[in-house]
Amino acid sequence: DAGVIQSPRHEVTEMGQEVTLRCKPISGHDYLFWYRQTMMRGLELLIYFNNNVPIDDSGMPEDRFSAKMPNASFSTLKIQPSEPRDSAVYFCASSYREVEQFFGPGTRLTVL
Amino acid sequence: GQNIDQPTEMTATEGAIVQINCTYQTSGFNGLFWYQQHAAEAPTFLSYNVLDGLEEKGRFSSFLSRSKGYSYLLLKELQMKDSASYLCASLDSNYQLIWGAGTKLIIKP
């Protein structure tokens, strides 16, 4: 298997623009997680899905963030409008049941 | 509240042994994970403990004491490539991972 795939790997955008991050989980995994990592706050869980259904989105910072999982092989995290404080590395991870999570390579987002 | 504590940074010498400690307080407990994260890379799984005791896997071992809310990761025969951050995470009663801030391990020749 190719592992968890994320795109783009790097994104530079200007404040106010819409940003869409994409994730393809490992085939057969039933959980998908979106994380954000910064030096100041470490690794933060934003939202996770079980069988394509959002289970807990309490980590989503505010209404500017939204996530979807239309099918078992694809998920998006959208930020609209983006702000400089959203600059971080965004990781997608997947797992079979709730145990070991496999992380994608991450998307490094810079909002100017 | 939920809390994971681990040292911010540690330094060790190549070839030596280092122990990274982690204490946790979470709502329920379903296991303790250790992940390794090299700079600018994704975290990768190292170990999972759910029962008390020591689990050995090559040069890396992980220990858990549920009664004390304590775990450690033991790295033997340190190599320069072991320089990384080590993240401790507790699986709570909702099967959600609660992450520590990570311990940055610096290996010196």
Image (cartoon, coloured by chain):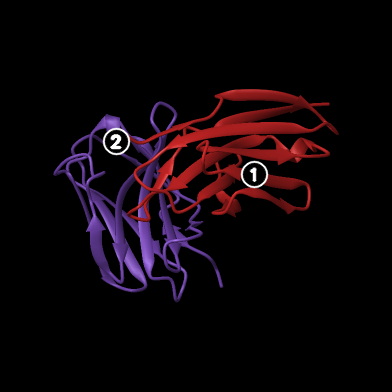
Chain colours: A purple, B red
Question: Mark 1 highlights which residue?
Answer: B63
Front residue of this view, candidates A64 and A103:
A103
Quarter of the image with the C terminus of chain A in it: top left
x then y, percent, for residue B38: 61, 40
Q: Is residue B39 visible?
A: no
Q: Is residue B48 visible?
A: yes
> Disc 1 versus disc 2: distance between alpha carbons?
36 Å
Question: Mark 2 highlights which residue?
Answer: A86
Looking at the rendering, which quadrant does residue B83 occupy?
A: top right
Front residue of this view, candidates A106 and B27:
B27
Drawn side of residue A98 relative to residue A74, left or right: right
Q: Secondary structure at mark 2?
A: helix
Q: Which chain letter goes with mark 1?
A: B
Looking at the rendering, which quadrant does residue B77 occupy?
A: top right
Please tell me which residue is depicted at 54% across the width and 39% down the height of the picture.
B87
**Would you place residue B77 above or below residue A9 in this image?**
above
Decide: few, some or many residues near mark 2? Use Cα within 10 Å; few <14, some 14-19, many ≥20: some
Please tell me which residue is depicted at 21% across the width and 42% down the height of the picture.
A17
In the picture as drawn, the residue positioned furthest to the left comes out as: A63
Front label number (1 vs 2): 1
